[in-house]
Amino acid sequence: MKTPLLALALWSLILRPGLPFWTSHVSRNCQDGSYEISVLMMNNSAFPESLDSLEEVVKEGVKIVSQRLLEAGLNVTVNATFIYSEGVIYKSSDCRSSTCEGLDLLRTISSKKQMGCVLMGPSCTYSTFQMYLDTDLNYPMISAGSFGLSCDYKETLTRMMSPARKLMYFLVEFWKVKFQFKPFSWNTAYVFKNSTETEDCFWYLNALEAGVSYFSQKLGFKEMLRGDTEFQDILMDQNRKSNVIVMCGRPETIQNLRGNRAVAEDIVIILVDLFNDHYFMDNVTAPDYMKNVLVLTLPPENSVSNSSSSKNLSLAKNDFAAAYLDGVLLFGHMLKIFLENGEDVTTSKFAHAFRNITFEGHVGPVTLDACGDIDNTMYLLYTSVDTSKYKVLLTYDTRVNQTSPVDKSPTFIWKNHKLPNDIPGQGPQMLMIAVFTLAGTVVLLLLIALLVLRKYKREHALRQKKWSHIPPEDIFPLESNETNHVSLKIDDDKRRDTIQRLRQCKYDKKRVILKDLKHNDGNFTEKQKIELNKLLQIDYYNLTKFYGTVKLDSTIFGVTEYCERGSLREVLNDTISYPDGTFMDWEFKISVLYDIAKGMSYLHSSKTEVHGRLKSTNCVVDSRMVVKITDFGCNSILPPRKDLWTAPEHLRVASVSQKGDVYSYGIIAQEIIQRRETFYTLSCRDQKEKIFRVENCNGVKPFRPDLFLETAEEKELEVYLLVKSCWEEDPEKRPDFKKIENTLAKIFGLFHDQKNESYMDTLIRRLQLYSRNLEHLVEERTQLYKAERDRADQLNFMLLPRLVVKSLKEKGFVEPELYEEVTVYFSDIVGFTTICKYSTPMEVVDMLNDIYKNFDHILDHHDVYKVETIGDAYMVASGLPKRNGNRHAIDIAKMALDLLSFVGTFELEHLPGLPIWIRIGIHSGPCAAGVVGIKMPRYCLFGDTVNTASRMESTGLPLRIHVSGSTIAILKRTECQFLYEVRGETYLKGRGTETTYWLTGVKDQEYNLPTPPTA
């Protein structure tokens, strides 16, 4: 019941504007010797203190204030007014559903003119934040709570209980500090949160969870544990990333979570339990499950003061009540200062004065910091393994942000009675340090020797380098009749676009590809010039020719050989131009693998030595179906990127190697054999996940694409085994390309020997197969064309009425037409602007999409036409472009009832519990319609009927169907017996006053209509 009540309260704010302008013009009982405290009486489930008891505490505080003022010679009257919620909305609510309760109480104060000098309450973060968000408070507010970060730094807010900000300061300070019993600084933590916490714990943990909080920014690692299972699993997880777990609750919380489970010896649990005096009671023994726990708490009130009133202590039974009592005494202290100085307490100065002071509380001095938050001393307790008693380990003064050890030799359960490191398995090991130091020295000497040798080789290479750019005037654009290769594939535009992006040109009467080298000025380094010079010297049948570089439009391009059929990946995707039955048989696949292996074998034996970016998109096919390798070398200019072809060792450490090229070849081979997507596997389809699993494979069997030996034929088995050896996890176990080339040559030779046919016979056989299959390919393409045409028609029918689309296709235009009688429906979302205020733009788009997708589904069951949606407005018409007699009124009326029924059950994902209310208006009459515009044409409606329907919607009420008299008259002429109520006379702009009606249903039919709100 809490969520609907919260939503109803929020809607009461949306429909009753004015509270955001609730300012200081409200009269105040705060002058002429009479000073009043306005106390907002709201429940807080975190502190089970009855409102009657709080009222007694406040009254006792008022007596103490009056006595102190009288002793100071100030004869004034101080009293308190208690404001309770008048409705039943908030009776069963707690802080999680109190967003609007404070605003409701402020409205009560405003209406009854009850405002005093200061506001006491609310204690709930939600309510306090909403009051500051939606009102212009220029009065001091004192809160016993409001722990959340959203209430920090409010200029007129004073918090009498430790907020989350103070907790974060302690944790960061304790994490970084070192003591004899804490030899390590900490930088990691787990935070446990399971959504069953009390109000204070909820906001403490919420602050630790927030990514922008001080705690999150200072820690190097922080992870949330959600749910009991995650907490229990981490206690003995050998792969955990931190030994420290922060949680909030009581000792019983630890007991319920841990049970009898074992806990790793270096686990440290920080239990935040600030407002619990249990640990300081006599004869309290700590249970065994608390030995791994450090408790952060506040000392009992009677332990921080030398003198106190026994009556005051009996009234202030807990910290919550004590905060109320101290809040009243704070007001009395500030009132005394202002009256003694002759200053006005109704000014802004008084509202901003409740900070950076110390005053006499009910048990001693109380200090407030510059932000108006209480300062105190927190205690960190531990369980002594000798006595099983709680002992104070250290204290933390929030005023000076300083930690002071109390027990310098604690008897911990942890090893050597010292807190462990926060990272498992780390600690000072002198032997390991010595080994690493010696190894580092050896490596340094080797590096020096390698640098000297490298310098000598570079100087030698510089003496041999020859390099120059191709003049831009030698690069010519293609002629208009020089088109790309022909393909039977309908979606060939994708491949054509890819090739065109590579910028085709002509150089030395040959077509070439310009490859962007991501270099702006062409001033290559010496190393890069040497690499480019090596590429110029490569000339091999299975490698594309590199001609040099050219500077065009302030960009440096590499000029390489053009291959007509595109990349190997594109050929594999094009099953129409290159069907399996003719081209892509097993023999052709072996030939492709052999071409790549020959090219890579030559490349590895050349001065370039390594490719670095081998993938199926860098293997291109020329007009004679010869596969060539491109985009090799130049790794200092175009460093390789992580992708599905990258070897696991290079995913972990960015680098290139010949063994890495072999792994890439194995991935390409699997693409060729199975003719599926890159790195195809049934167990995973996401590309990023595949890369992650390859990079972080710690198991016995590394993650690889699917290639099952069990399903391989005898002639395929040897190739399968070769491919699997290419992607071995250990690079040294992978074969080199010379071995791969020899193996495939042997397989290819045996294949032809067994078939007893020459290469020419093979070519003729392939041409015959292709010619016999051509008719089938053309027919298949025709079917694909028809399917595309049908999809285009379906899309047009979704944008325009079917009759209009037919007219446009046949005539090229649509004649505007006048309809004697149609029915128009308008609706919009009530409070849409306010909902947008509390939503992100993407949430607004998702909300409208969810609502109107369901509306569209409902429209499919009625003879209606959706005209358009503009923002939150929804417009539907019936009776056009196809006339349907009197059915237009019936269909619109029934559709409106269905839409209203749906709205009654709809719930927003990002604002759960907040209902959606819509206004609906319906009117019938004559209308003109036609297609307007050429680009993005719209079928538009014109006439007074459209305007009147819009007026019916705007003058309607939430969750009501507002119907005009003309529509009711049509409905009466039909056999359907609609139920309606007479609303009465309604003024419609442009038409004057008319009698209108509320449509409520259909006789003998049930509609689950939501109950409209009362005025």
Image (cartoon, rainbow, N blue to C red):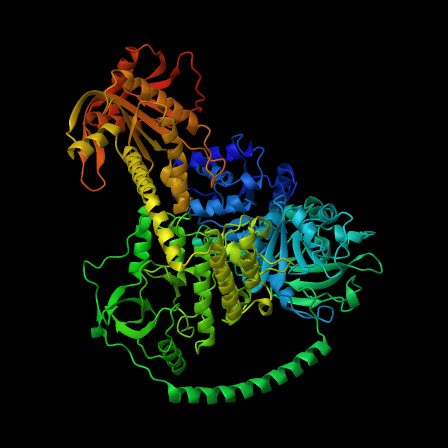
Query: Could you tell me which residue is drawn at 34 percent across and 61 percent down?
Result: 622
State the residue in front, 1014 or 131.
Answer: 1014
Residue 513: image quadrant is bottom left
Q: Is residue 4 left or right of residue 284?
A: left
Give the image location of residue 673, x and y in percent: 48, 54
- Quarter of the image with the N terminus in it: top right
Q: Is residue 939 above or below residue 674?
A: above
Residue lying farthest right?
386
Give the image location of residue 325, x and y in percent: 62, 48
For residue 215, say whether it is visible: no
Give the image location of residue 957, x and y in percent: 35, 27
Q: Is residue 40 above or below residue 286?
A: above
Residue 872: image quadrant is top left
State the residue in front, 512 or 798.
Answer: 512
User: Looking at the image, how many numbered discs can be counted on the residues?
Assistant: 0
Q: Is residue 480 left or right of residue 468?
A: left
Residue 945: image quadrant is top left
Give the image location of residue 561, x and y in percent: 32, 68
For residue 383, say whether it is visible: yes
Q: Is residue 305 left or right of residue 670?
A: right
Q: Is residue 523 above or below residue 475?
A: below
- Quarter of the image with the C terminus in it: top left
State the residue in front, 605 or 835.
Answer: 605
